Amino acid sequence: MKRSTPYFLLFPALLFTIVVLVYPLLQNLHNSLRRVSLIRGMGDWSGLLNYERVFQDSLFWLAFQNTVLYASVGTMLALGVGLAFALLLNMKIGRITNIMGFLYTVPWVISPVVAGFAWKWLLNDNFGIINHWLISLSIVTEGITWLGDPTTALLCVIVARVWQFYPFAMVMFLAGLQAIPEEQYEAAAVDGASTARKFIHITLPNLRSVAIVLLLLGVIWSFNDFNMVFVMTRGGPIHASMVLPVLVREFSFVQFDLGKGSALSMLIFGTLIVLSVIYLRVVSKRGPA
Amino acid sequence: MRHVPKTLLLTALLSLCCGGPRNGVELQLWNFGGTPKMIEWVRARADSFNASHAMVRVVQSQKSWNMIRELLYANLGAGTGPDVMNVHANYAAEFGGAGFFYPLNTFHDFQEVKSWFEPHMLESTRYGDNYYGLPCSAIAFTLICNKAMFDAAGIAPPRTWSEFRRAAKLLTRDSDGDGTIDQWGLVLLGGDRGGFSYRFAPFLYRAGMNILSDDLRRVEFNTPVGIQALQLFVDMHQVDHSITPGFLAYQHSEINDLFCSNKVAMCIEGPWFRSLVEQKSAGKEFYTVPVPVPDNLLDQYDTLPTLQDMVMYAINGNTKHPHEAWELVKYFRSCEADMFWITEELGAVATTTAALHCPQAALKENLSIYIHELKHARPWPPHPGIISIANNVITPWCQKAIVGEISAEVAMRAAAAEAQEIIDRGP
């Protein structure tokens, strides 16, 4: 084999990476440092002005706060729900375990756009099934305007996010649970440990590294999640559920300020790089399971 | 001799691979939005143009109306895009002013073509001294009243703001007696920022106000009357609770669902609403009346303007084939073509004088009210920043006031300051 053969074979993949990843990234960085408008084209060099404009925009801080909430609360709750279901499935109650295992993973395989539309209709204030149930059970007297109220809109998209992410957490936790040596539980039983103590002192420490990986992945994926929020609320009402990825669209394709949109996407990219580095370090420390 | 078949095959393959127009010009036509019937008509019209123009081939592409600005900005800004497209008439200022649309008045027969159209409709396509499109599908915003609900309450459609507020309050009730409100007087399109401003602006115009000054340099919607217009909605939402509580999340489909299921009595819509209602609830009746006016202007009820909106067929300023594109635009907007807007229910009004005054037009339901409203209606001011002002400034500030986050006065003052900044910044 010639020395150049591997490079030759790698060339298509390398070219693809350059075209779809490296070039857009560099172009975006370039745009973020200039005055760019789709209608006026590429303008003057503006240094860090676009970044300054992003930080001066109150909408950015609202979106940042919402994104942190969406990513952290959404992921934590999804981890909690995922762990609960994983524990349930790990009990192996006959054949029903397999059926429930399949059902629990359904949200994971549904497209976020389809799921977003489904949630939008479930939460519809007049025709939604959730309000119908709440009224039927006399929990509320009139329909709640879930997505039309600035105080509840973000909560709704967080719930939808939890619903979508928990199956992944469940599968990962289930794998973690099944890897815990049975001897540890047997030894604890001999010492007279209760179920709760076994859970706190054996199960949770053994799942620690899985939880950290899930937390990081959940935060990373939530941080750049556009679909669910856009389909359900478009960042509204009155920006109440605005998150950073939707704000990039707002700056770039609603206000047509490409420079500002590019600057914001570079900031999101930087944040995600930091989170990814932490994730990779955690994973490499964990080593092979 | 042996190579002849190979050469022939190669030539045939090459000609197939090259594709494109054979012996002529290829025109790209982008059709944004439209009802299924309209889309079908555009296709048939393009085919008919191809059949009658041997040297030109129209390649039609259907695009989403929701993506219109993004697609136009991205393509026209890059010097590409279609040769001919249907767009909002108020893009004449934004895109025409930037040189992205071809000035149609430079064609030698423009004066003759101009005479096809109702003058006030053609004016909406003008920016500065140039006309950037031929009108199509005119729209006037009106008040739609649910006939079943109004008749059951024994009231007539409102004409003044007080009547409007009273009617909405009266029609907000617990219809099934379970102790909760399940029927509202008014629904607003709050989940679509453009849609909201298009429903609020008619109230400003009907109050005799301007959005911008005549020279387009000063914001004028923050007058006491403008604040009163916003206060009307604030009171209806905050005091009377006669606007559907979840309106901030509503898109067109929710408005239609609520109206067809008799959960709301009024909405502010245009001529397209008939076909939407027909799809969901065939035969449902409603009153189409002008948007109410302030009480003290009742004597001008018939002449105060509402908001006019319109589509126009425009030509790309960078097209390589302006004359062929012009022929196509004329073919799509001729009086004969415009008759389709009279014979079919397309959700918009014809724009040529011949079509609007033909005998069939007199038989078309509600057409007379739209013709009347369009005679006085005004479009958004022809300023390049007006769409941004309407969608990104007026809507969020007014919505904040309606839901009670700030007062109407503060909202209008803040919106005016932001809008003035956009105007001062220039295109």
Image (cartoon, rainbow, N blue to C red):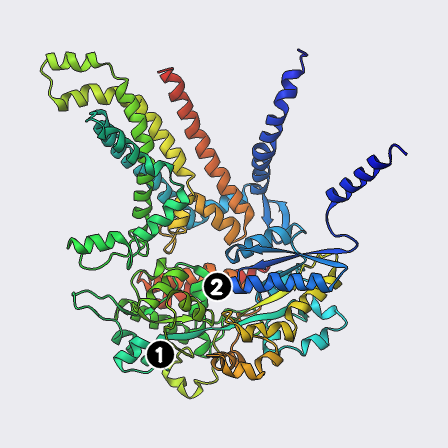
Please rate how many residues cluster around mark 1, counting C-alpha atoms within 10 Å: few if below 14, some from 14 to 19, many from 20: many
Under mark 2, the amino acid is Ala
The chain to which mark 2 is attached is: B
Please rate how many residues cluster around mark 2, counting C-alpha atoms within 10 Å: few if below 14, some from 14 to 19, many from 20: many
Q: Look at 38% across and 17% down and name the residue there.
A: A285
Image quadrant in which you'd find residue B242: bottom left
Under mark 1, the amino acid is Trp
Disc 2 + disc 1, Cβ < 8 Å: no
Image quadrant in which you'd find residue A194: top left
Depth order, front residue of B360/B9: B9
Task: Name the outermost residue toward the bottom.
Answer: B299
Inter-mark Cα distance, 2 to 1: 22 Å
Marking on residue B161: 1
Measured as percent of width and height from the top left, residue A23 is found at 60, 35
Q: Is residue A248 left or right of residue B118?
A: left
Image quadrant in which you'd find residue B294: bottom left
Measured as percent of width and height from the top left, residue B73 is found at 59, 54
Depth order, front residue of A94/B234: A94
Marking on residue B390: 2
Of labels 2 and 1, earlier in sequence is 1
